[in-house]
Image: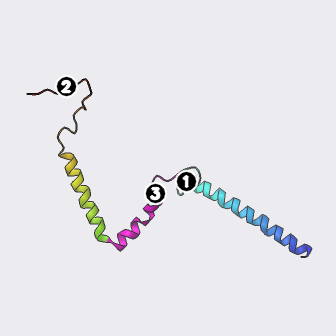
Amino acid sequence: MTFWNAVLWCLIGISGLAALYGLHRLGLWLEKRGWLFYKHKKPSSSAAGCFVALQQVLEPPIQHVLHVNEQKRQQAEEGVPGKDDKPMTSDDTPLTP
């Protein structure tokens, strides 16, 4: 290996490190603007959420089933008697008519 080959490899290594640092700073800037989850902010959902759009394209009827199930659940929760009542504690006694 000649002297100039060694200098060339050192320059390539230094420029590679500089490029990595530049990408790191770019990631921090994008995170500050809210465009990227990089180092400090963590996403609130899982990575599986990325595939929701793909599943909707491949299986469109699934979305309708989920929508109907959500409506049924909301109607069932609205019809529960005593849902908004105060919960009983151990010293409360229920009143019988």
Find the distance from the CA under tag 1 to the CA under tag 3.
Answer: 21 Å
The disc placed on residue 91 is none
Q: Which range of residues does the magenta coloring cover?
A: 42-59
Residue 43: image location, x then y, percent: 49, 53
Q: CA distance from mark 2 to mark 1?
A: 56 Å
Residue with the mark numbered 1: 33
Residue 50 lies in quadrant: bottom left
Callout 1 secondary element: helix
Q: Which residue is disc 2 drawn over?
A: 93
**Amino acid on which the number 2 mark rests in the picture:** Thr
Q: Quadrant of the C terminus?
A: top left
> Marks 1 and 3: CB-CB under 8 Å?
no
> Dot 2: few (<14), some (14–19), or many (≥20) neighbours within 10 Å?
few
Judging depth in this view, the residue of 16 and 80 nearest the camera is: 80
Q: Magenta segment: does it hold 66? A: no
Residue at image location 61% in from the left, 54% down from the top: 28
Q: Most prominent secondary structure in the magenta stretch? A: helix
Asked whether the residues under the numbered discs 2 and 1 touch, taking CB atoms below 8 Å apart as contact, a structural biologist would say no
Mark 1 or 3: the one toward you = 3
In the displayed structure, 44 sits above or below 14; it is above
User: Which of the two marks, 3 or 2, is nearer to us in this view?
Assistant: 2
Instruction: Kindly identify the residue that appears in the image at 74 percent across and 66 percent down.
Output: 16
Of marks 1 and 3, which one's residue comes earlier in the chain? 1
Give the residue pinned by disc 3. Answer: 46
Measured as percent of width and height from the top left, residue 55 is found at 38, 69
